[in-house]
Amino acid sequence: MQGCPYTLPRCHEWHAADRFHHSRSLRNTCPQPQVRAAVTIPAPPWDGARDPCLSPKFLNGSVGAIGPLEPSAMNLCWNEIKKKSHNLRARLEAFSDHSGKLQLPLQEIIDWLSQKDEELSAQLPLQGDVALVQQEKETHAAFMEEVKSKGPYIYSILESAQAFLSQHPFEELEETHSESKDTSPRQRIQNLSRFVWKQATVASELWEKLTARCVDQHRHIEHTLEHLLEIQGTMEELSSTLTQAEGVRATWEPIGDLFIDSLPEHIQAVKLFKEEFSPVKDGVKLVNDLAHQLAISDVHLSMENSRALEQINIRWKQLQMSVGERLKQLQDAHRDFGPGSQHFLSTSVQVPWERAISPNKVPYYINHQAQTTCWDHPKMTELYQTLADLNNIKFSAYRTAMKLRRVQKALRLDLVTLTTALEIFNEHDLQASEHVMDVVEVIHCLTALYERLEEERGILVNVPLCVDMSLNWLLNVFDSGRSGKMRALSFKTGIACLCGTEVKEKLQYLFSQVANSGSQCDQRHLGALLHEAIQVPRQLGEVAAFGGSNVEPSVRSCFRFSTGKPVIEASQFLEWVNLEPQSMVWLAVLHRVTIAEQVKHQTKCSICRQCPIKGFRYRSLKQFNVDICQTCFLTGRASKGNKLHYPIMEYYTPTTSSENMRDFATTLKNKFRSKQYFSKHPQRGYLPVQSVLEADCSETPSSSPMLPHADTHSRIEHFASRLAEMESQNCSFFNDSLSPDDSIDEDQYLLRHSSPITDREPAFGQQAPCSMGTESKGELEKILAHLEDENRIMEGKA
């Protein structure tokens, strides 16, 4: 027998009170599945077992045995049959009438539930409008009330059906029975029971489905209404905020009408405005997310709400673009026209030239007349053309130094002290040498440097021209590819090399930039410093004379003073630089050139007859009373009999009486020396640097001018052999393979020099490998007197 799957579901929200009563009654009355119940069904009238008159024995008995029935007995039996038949018919009619009373209401319930299910489906999808959803909420509430009111009636019918089925259980329909055309009353009763069961099952399922859908629909409407209200409120707030922001945007003045000094204030105001309205971004994101969630649940915003949301998104994007564009315009204007901009540098050129800026902020120059462009400033081009006049100088160190002197004066860096430069470096946070600077940073530093120069010196400086020229020179030296970037170490090296400060102070500062906290430097950092320094002569095309771009030999030469340690100290570095190593000699020569510019020597040039001699003075230590001016000496001019391969002394300061006496004694000593002696004891004015992995250094001619302290402080004549021996011992760094040559080697010809402090202590930058103790005046006079006596005797014999 079939079970009772239509046990009535109840919406706990509606019938919580009578849940227990119904569930108990249904459990008690519902038959168990697959259990055949004993159903008491009245027997049909032809059932002999129930009526003795209809028994086979009675009907088929032998007439002879019993005898023929009497009419009264026949009537009695017939009446009994009729009575039983009438009772059975009445019971069948009553059963049919009872089942019919269940079938009709069950079918009505099924139809009603189907109709309500269709009505519930018709309520979807919901419209994305608050008013419409609220209206739908009210409609659904009325719908639920209607369903709820129908609940008791449905439950009563279903309970009646369950009671009916418990009284009249049915068996499962067998296939043979289903194919039989003639149905017995018993089968008819079971068919009716089965039909009632089917109707009750469908009605129960529909009721369960409808009540569940009502609850889900109610929750869906509540959730949708909540989201719509949040969307509507957020959009109203966003619209108000955007209107306020658009009002502020409308008050912005055009960029061209703003004062340059007020640009930083406007930039700050726009940044604050951007921060103040940053919550709008979160609000716009929230409302868009809510709309997306509703769309996923098949709730689409109404046309009005969709247009409002679209307008909010458009207005927000336009506001963002306006703020970003405004900020960019202000920053560009501040960069191009502000105090730290390149706009003021446009005045550094004159018509037909125009200063332009590349995308990486590197300046270039347009000649509208010739319709050409170039990287170099017009004034820088003119300066380079004037440097060509110095190419006739035979000695590369002096040629390089004099070219740098012209550049230094053109950039007016000779007026800048290292102290002032360090203040500017610190103000612009350039302590980290590995920091990479762009062109704008370089311009800011140079501008501050020249403005400070004006304040300190009280002079008028063409700041735009000086800044542009210095920037041009720094880019040529350290960024020839015009990438627009240079290391802070490069920038500080360039400024320190050309500033107007003692060379010793410059080198101490440069060493400190690569040294660690303990004032020590390893080979890698020293190589970086020397590499930056060698870029200065490289830009002038003179790098070959100073050992080339490879600084490794110079690093190894310097670290010979470190006594085998992996680091070198500042004192050891300065000791090495005092020898004027080949890679750094140009810096010391630049210092001497600067000092010699203002010096006048009250003597006559033996070649061009200039008197007084200005600048460097070169005195022959082989011939008496032979002085040469710097022009004649550096260009290689010589008169007959005055060859440059003999010892020569350079002075970049006025000579003193003691220096004159010393040179006289040295000249007298050299008179007694043969040419072979000078071949064996060549004089050199710098420390050559050589590596076994590289080619040998070029020859240094023996006619290189001597440093006065190296040979002229020696004891004259009878100490000559001792002096030569000391030179051989102390000049172990030199290349012993060098031999004298009558020709001038313009790459290696460096000079010995004298300074006002010669008689007191060795000057910084001199090379003094054979320096000796100070001799007393009396001893010197005694030796000179002895030599003069010998000279008179020789003259008498002649």
Image (cartoon, grey):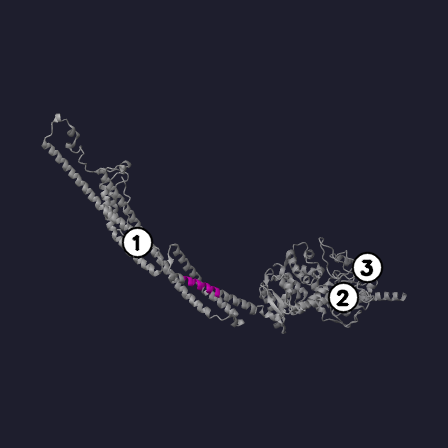
Residue 406 occupies which quadrant of the picture? bottom right
Q: Which numbered disc, 2 or 1, marks the residue closer to the eye?
A: 1
Q: For the residues labelled 1 and 3, say whether their Cβ atoms are less than 8 Å apart.
A: no
Residue 656 screen position, x and y as percent? 76, 70
Amino acid type, label 3: Tyr
Q: Which residues are magenta?
A: 309-322
Q: Secondary structure at mark 1?
A: helix
Residue 239 occupies which quadrant of the picture? bottom left
Q: Which numbered disc, 2 or 3, marks the residue closer to the eye?
A: 2
Q: Which residue is mark 2?
A: 635
Residue 77 screen position, x and y as percent? 13, 33
Asked if 56 appears above or below 689 in the picture, the reply is above
- Which of marks 3 and 1 precedes in the sequence? 1
- Which of marks 1 and 2 precedes in the sequence? 1
Q: Which residue is mark 1?
A: 119
- The crowd level at tag 2 (other Cα within 10 Å; few <14, some 14-19, many 20+) is some
Type of secondary structure dominating the magenta stretch:
helix
Amino acid type, label 1: Glu
Residue extending farthest to the right is: 797
Asked if 66 appears above or below 531 in the picture, the reply is above
Amino acid type, label 2: Thr
Q: For the residues labelled 2 and 1, say whether their Cβ atoms are less than 8 Å apart.
A: no
For the residues marked 2 and 1, what is the alpha-carbon distance in whole angstroms?
Answer: 114 Å
Residue 298 screen position, x and y as percent? 37, 55
Residue extending farthest to the front is: 181
Residue 482 screen position, x and y as percent? 62, 62
Q: Which residue is mark 3?
A: 677
Q: Is any atom of residue 11 visible in this view?
A: no
- The crowd level at tag 3 (other Cα within 10 Å; few <14, some 14-19, many 20+) is few
Q: Secondary structure at mark 3?
A: helix
Residue 710 occupies which quadrant of the picture? bottom right
| Point 31% across, 49% down: residue | 209
